Amino acid sequence: MEINIVNEVAALRRLSVAQLRLRFAELFGETTNASNRTWLTKRILWRMQALVEGDLSQRARQRAAQLARDADLRLNAPHGKTTTTTTTPQPVGIPAPIDQRLPPPGTILTRPYKGQLIQVQVLSEGFAYAGRIHPSLNAVAKTITGSHTNGYLFFRNSLNHNKETT
């Protein structure tokens, strides 16, 4: 018996998801709750091909089983089961890496913007602008412009000027 893949694909595309589930049950001998049309079609076509041309060889099955035994199949805990720990983990104080693009703390970045001279002070833990501490140059640039702006690009001339003078 031969199958014509093109005809089978065309026939499967005309079926509803419920009809694909029925076809799946006929070929696999078990039902499925899957409602993904593409997945169902691929599995049905694979099973039809395996029935016509033969399934995996015994050697291939043994190799697949060996790979499955060697692999860590579950990376997350099963759903519905909670794990409890007796100790609460303590936060580790890892210092944030210093961005090499920034000048040292205490430096004042200046930039003209819409007729005003913007001044931002670089701190060890953020940036001071208009009496507030901002966590990043992006946050400062957003406060100034009112839109998402890359802080490094917004202050690029001031940042480049500071590097040339050091």
Image: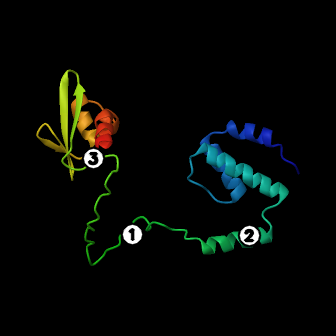
Circle on res. 81: 1
Identify the residue at horizontal 29%, vertical 46% (top origin). Answer: 166
Quadrant of res 5: top right
- For numbered disc 2, what is the local secondary structure? helix
Q: Residue 69 appears at what percent x and percent y?
A: 62, 75
Crowd rating for badge 3 (residues with CA inside 10 Å; few <14, some 14–19, many 20+): many
Mark 1 surroundings: few (<14), some (14-19) or many (≥20) residues within 10 A: few
Q: How far apart are marks 3 and 2 (CA)?
A: 60 Å
Label 3: element kind? loop
Q: Which of 115 and 145 is in front in this view?
A: 115
Query: Between 95 and 107, which is closer to the camera in this rendering?
Result: 107
Residue found at x 39% / y 66%:
80
Viewer-nearest of labels 1 and 2?
2
Q: Is residue 54 left or right of residue 159?
A: right
Q: Which of 114 and 9 is in front in this view?
A: 114
Q: Can see residue 149?
A: no
Q: Are marks 3 and 2 in contact (CB under 8 Å)?
A: no
- Label 2 crowding class (10 Å Cα cut-off): few <14, some 14-19, many 20+? few
Kindly identify which residue carries mark 2: 61
Seen at 32% across and 57% down, the residue is: 97
Indicate the amino acid at tag 3: Pro
Q: Is residue 24 visible?
A: yes
Residue at 18%, 35% (x, y): give it: 119
Give the colour scheme of this rendering. Answer: rainbow
* Residue occupied by mark 3: 103
Q: In this view, does 42 lie above or below 151?
A: below
Dot 3 or dot 2: first in sequence order is 2
